[in-house]
Structure formats: C-alpha cells, structure tokens
Image: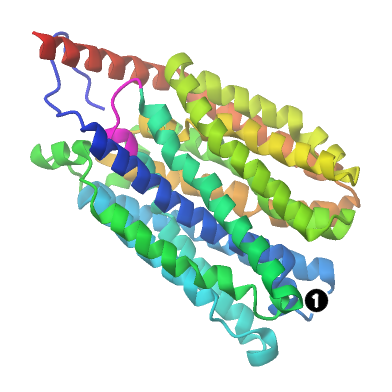
Amino acid sequence: MTTLAPGQVSQRRPTPPGEMRRIALAGAFGTGIELYDFLIFGLASGLVFPHVFFPQSDPLMGTLQSFMAFGAGFISRPLGGIIFGHFGDRVSRKTMLVITLLATGTCTVAMGLLPTYATVGAWAPVLLVSLRVLQGVFMGGEQSGAFIMVTEHAPAGHKAVLGAAVTAGSPIGSLLGIGAFQVVALATGDAFAQWGWRIPFLASAVLIGIGLWVRIGMSESPEFQKMQAESRTRKVPLAGVFAHALPFLIAGILVNLGFNQFIFIVNSFTTSYAAKTIGFAQSDVLLSGLAGSGGMLIAVFVAGRLADRFGLVRVMSAGALFQVIWAFPYFWLVNTGSVGALYLAVIGGYVGLSFVFGPMAAYYVNLFNPEHRYSGVAFSYNLGAVLGGGLSPSIATALLRHFGDSSGVSVYVAVGGLLTLVGLLITARHVRARERSQLLEAGLRRGAARA
C-alpha cells in the first residue's frame, strides 16, 4: 500500500455497491467450487478410493494411500501460486481468476471419468494422482487471487466482512459437496462405491459454467489498474516479496498452516475416523459436516464484521486460541460414539475456526504491497495449505496407527493453533498500521467529497 502524505487524497473511484456485490459473489463462487472439488475428493478418499484405486492394501493402509493422493493436490499448490501470482501481478488479476476456475473444474470432471484399478491396474492410481497434482497447480492461484480481487475493491472499514464473502465460499462448497455425496449415496445405494461416486465429480461441469458467467463480468482490480497506469509492475514480483516482506511471508505460511491443519482434520480425516474407527453411520458423519458448514457460513461474516470493528489480529488470535483449547475435547466428543456429541464436536470446530478464516482475506492482503501482493499472498497461503491441510489427514492417520488412539492427533492439532498464533504475533504491528492507514485514507476521501 502506498502511504499518503497528510492532506493528500487518493483519486481512486469507489467501487459502486452493485458492482461490489458482483465481485464478492464471484469470489465466493470461485472459492465454493474450489472447496467443492477438494471436499468431494477428500470424502471419496475416506469412503471410496481405498477400494476403487488402492484395493491391494489393508483397509487402514488403503485409507492412508488415498489421503496421500489427497495431499498431492496440496503439494503442487505453491507452484501454482508462483505461476499465477507472477502473472496476476504483471498481467491481470481478473484473467488469472478466470483461468484457474475453468482449469480446476475441468480436472474434477476428468476425475469422474477415470478407470478404476479393476479395469487398468496400477495406471488407475497414477492417473488419479496426476490429475490431482494438476488440479493443485490451478488451485494455487484461485483463492488467494479472490482474496485480493475482493479486498482491493472493498472500501476501508468493510474489507474484512466483504472479504468474508470469499471465505464463505468454503462452507458453501462444503454444503454442496457433502450434500451431493449424501444425495447420490442415498439414490445409488450399493452402487455408490461402484459408479455413484462419479456423479458429484461430473456435476462440477455445471458449477464451472455458472462461475464463469459471474466472473467474466467483473471489473479489474483498481489497485492493479493504478499500478499499470503508473508503470509500477515488477519483472519478478516474487523476488520483491523475498527482498522486502520475508517476515510477513513466513508469518502468512504459519497462519494458514495451523488453520488448515485442523479444518482438514474436521472435514476429511474425521469422515474416515468416525465411520471406520468409532462406528458412526456414514450418513451421520456427512450430515454433521453439513451442519458444521452451515454454522461456518454464518460465523465467517460475524468474524469479518468483528475484525473490521476490533482489528484483524485480535479476532483471528481468538480463533487460534480456540483451536488450541478445542483440540482434545473435539476427539473426546467424537470418541463417545454419541451422534449428538459428534455434531457438537464438528459444529464447534467449524464455528470456532471461522474466527481465523473469516477475516483471512483482509489479513493476507494487508501483508504485502500491491506490486507483489498476488505473488506474496499466493505463495504464503498455499505453502501453509500444503504443510497444514495437505498433510494433516495423512499425518493424523499415521498418528492414529502409531498410538492406537486419538491423543497424538489432538496434540498435533493444538500445535497447529500455536503456530497460527505465532504468525499473527509476527505481523500484529504491521497489520494494525495498515488498518489505520486505510481508515485515514477513507476519511480524507470522504472529507474531500463533502468539500
């Protein structure tokens, strides 16, 4: 962000409310499709893929291999972040978001057409993992780009709550993904494990069409337009991140690492653990996730509104502390075998983590200057996702196998919450200064308009 001299007023034209709503909707829809795609893969990894693509292993090892395939999509995300961050800082924020949406969904549809192990042998898991890796590359530019597009358009004092529209796409995607799996499982019965699982993957084609219609019509980011007009785009934006914002890059990695670590324990690992280890019915596990996603859909906007009022770091730190505190009660509740306790654990997890996730768009955008913002946000956000979410189901499964109970997983989750807190503390002073600067600029602009 460029600091204004006293009395100087930015000439940026505020985004009209109608256009702002479309941009927020476009961000939510793209993120929703991303989470839909990722979640149905995660659900299939726990429920179907061990039998369809890894049938030669014992049940727990087959689940572990499926979750490793799930994690492969995260491992390639930083590469996508570098690629799309570079061109998002140099060519166009909007164009990168259109490309990532189309390509991500195409990979999902292709997964629904894959042959199984019974048909082509070892080629089946190879093709699955290859598509997953390619999907991760395109996803590397999606959510981080949506963070930037929405918050660069949003007015000061409303950036966190409008940015929450992007994070709200995640529970929307979860609702769609879990709902699709539940409906298809009920409709296809025993055939679900044979061919019914393909339907949610193929249905992504419909979401792509709607998402493209919404996203193509939005305008380019005003910050990017200003950069181009002033010839401030850089040849290698990521180099600027390492040269001028390395502590914030590290902090951004830690914040998303801790959050992703727990959220993917809740929405992916728990699917397999609760059904196969504790003995819950598959429908109860899926419906508890559906209820939790509904709670998160509301809570991210509450958290965003609170962050605009009380500060990003304060609200997000409360969410990180919740993760540390909830790590053990979460599994104590699940381990009771009570359906009511399962719902309490999962809904509590989703809602509590919303206080990290809801304000996240505005937080990440405040870490980096516009010239290298897409590169910085995409790289730090996605590397954190790899180290947290991409590995957490596999690590949790390995910990369960080693210790024989959930205690090791709880410690792992609590450590993740502490890492998020460390990242927030590193950036606290910088983020608060950015928030004050934005409010000052907005006040000067309003004063100039009245004059």
Crowding near the residue tagged with mark 1, few <14, some 14–19, many ≥20 C-alpha atoms within 10 Å: few
Quarter containing the C terminus: top left
Find residue 275 and report its horizontal and vertical position in percent.
82, 58
**Taking 186 as reference, is 217 above or below it?**
above
Picture quadrant where residue 439 is located: top left
On whether residue 36 falls in the magenta region, the answer is no
Q: Is residue 437 left or right of residue 130?
A: left
Find residue 383 and report its horizontal and vertical position in percent.
50, 48
308 or 141: nearer the viewer: 308
Please name the residue shown 43% across and 41% down the image: 166
Please name the residue shown 67% across and 61% down the image: 182
Question: Where are the magenta residues, as a range?
Answer: 150-157
Quarter containing the N terminus: top left
Find the residue positioned furthest to the front.
187
The answer to whether any part of residue 240 appears in the image is no
Amino acid type indicated by mark 1? Ser
Find residue 2 and report its horizontal and vertical position in percent.
22, 25
Q: Is residue 5 left or right of residue 342?
A: left
**Taking 183 as reference, is 337 above or below it?**
above
The answer to whether any part of residue 43 appears in the image is yes
Residue topped by disc 1 = 57
Q: How is the image coloured?
A: rainbow
Please name the residue shown 89% across and 50% down the image: 403
Q: Look at the numbered disc 1 and give the secondary structure of its residue.
A: loop
**Taking 185 as reference, is 390 above or below it?**
above
